[in-house]
Image (tube, rainbow, N blue to C red):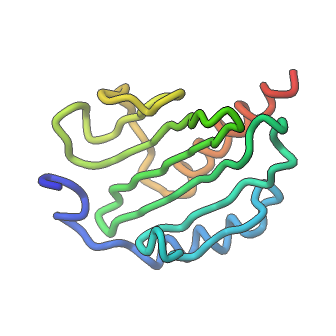
Amino acid sequence: MAGSSRDSAPIDFDVLDDMRTYLRKSNRFADVEWRPSYAPDSLVCIYDPGFYPVSVEDSSLKITWYKNDDFNIHYQENWASGEQRKCRWDRHPNDHNTRDHYHPLPDAATPGTDESYPRNWKDILSSVLSEIDGRIEAFWR
């Protein structure tokens, strides 16, 4: 993919490992998968299904982080109806938005909305988790 983070910087496995240590402490996740075979450059967090109504079969957060602090964070819900709902937080060079951008629910459409993310991965991850927590809480209102 021309102009992608993959072209300009290697994966930052040290940051992903720090994230793994942090996210394993959260009760949100049933599993935190370190570089699974289907996503060897990523950390994949599988949400505990007890947080969702039964109409949501499963949900996950996939994180890829680069040594230049570019990133892709993908959230996806798989519904019993066969529908997928997804969104994505990104920092990378592209032709459709500013370097920092968000592709919103329900389908992570491109172009997304321009954003301005903090530099520190902890601040970014905290913001992403907070947004997803709000979505989960809305299911139960």
Q: Residue furthest top?
A: 141
- Position above or below: 66 against 118: below
Please count the marks in the image.
0
- Position above or below: 32 against 141: below
Of residue 125 and residue 53, the one placed in the foreground of this image is 53
Res 81 quadrant in image: top right
User: Could you tell me residue 82's position as x and y percent?
Assistant: 61, 37
Q: Image check: 83 left or right of 109?
A: right
Of residue 74 and residue 123, the one placed in the foreground of this image is 74
User: Could you tell me residue 52's position as x and y percent?
Assistant: 81, 40
The residue shown at (48%, 51%) is 73
User: Could you tell me residue 6's position as x and y percent?
Assistant: 24, 64
Q: Image check: 6 left or right of 140?
A: left
The residue shown at (17%, 55%) is 1
Q: Looking at the figure, which quarter contains the C terminus?
A: top right
The residue shown at (51%, 71%) is 16
- Position above or below: 5 against 22: above
User: Could you tell me residue 39's position as x and y percent?
Assistant: 46, 68
Q: Image check: 126 left or right of 68?
A: right
Res 100 quadrant in image: top left
The residue shown at (21%, 31%) is 96
Q: Residue furthest left?
A: 2
Of residue 18 and residue 34, the one placed in the foreground of this image is 34
